[in-house]
Image (cartoon, rainbow, N blue to C red):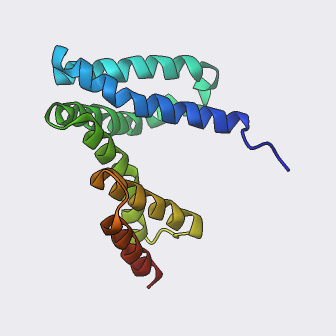
Amino acid sequence: MGKVFSKSTWALLLLVFIWGGSYPIYKVAVPYTPPLLFAGMRALIGGLILAALIYKMRNRIRWRENWAKYCISAFFNTILFFGLQTIGLMYLPGGLFSVLVYFQPVLLGLFAWIWLGEYMSPLKNHGFDYWIFWNCNCQCGRINRSCINHWCSLRVAYGI
């Protein structure tokens, strides 16, 4: 039997805790900084840390061939995404905002399944199932009969 917590599992757990803890920090910092400046500082600091970590692999990105793709990706995935997130954080409570931001990758997977025909394995289906139950729990504030009924009806809809 292999180890339960490998190096990659610890790294993933660290990432989840850092990412999850960052939104309350953002909620405290946003009132003292203009939204787009804060988003830029967040992206710059994260980019510098990432650049330091992957410095040895810099030749693999083939910048001269793919610079336009990288710039388009940076605009949509960093500038626009972080900027809109920071503006949204000013108008929503931190907990609700975290739930909505974590909904984005789930929604992406769901749309890939619906529109692009992405294969939905049992493991992916279980992940969606877990997220729906978790989100329902967050919205209700606790697990109650309504949440469980909603969750069960969605499970039946997935089965059909």
Answer with the quarter of the image where residue 24 lies.
top left
Answer with the quarter of the image where residue 114 lies.
bottom left
Give coordinates of residue 68: x percent, y percent. 37, 36
Give coordinates of residue 143: x percent, y percent. 37, 58
Q: How many numbered marks, from 0 up?
A: 0
Residue located farthest toward the bottom when viewing the structure as drawn: 160
The residue at 39%/61% (across/down) is 132
Residue located farthest toward the right when viewing the structure as drawn: 1
Give coordinates of residue 22: x percent, y percent. 38, 27
* Quadrant into which the C terminus falls: bottom left
- Relative to 12, does residue 159 appear above or below in the rendering? below
Please state which of residues 23 and 148 is positioned toward the viewer in this rendering.
Answer: 148
Q: Is residue 27 visible?
A: yes
Q: Is residue 108 visible?
A: no
Please state which of residues 6 and 40 is positioned toward the viewer in this rendering.
Answer: 6
The residue at 67%/37% (across/down) is 8
Is 54 situated left or right of 65 in this image? right
Give coordinates of residue 124: x percent, y percent. 53, 63
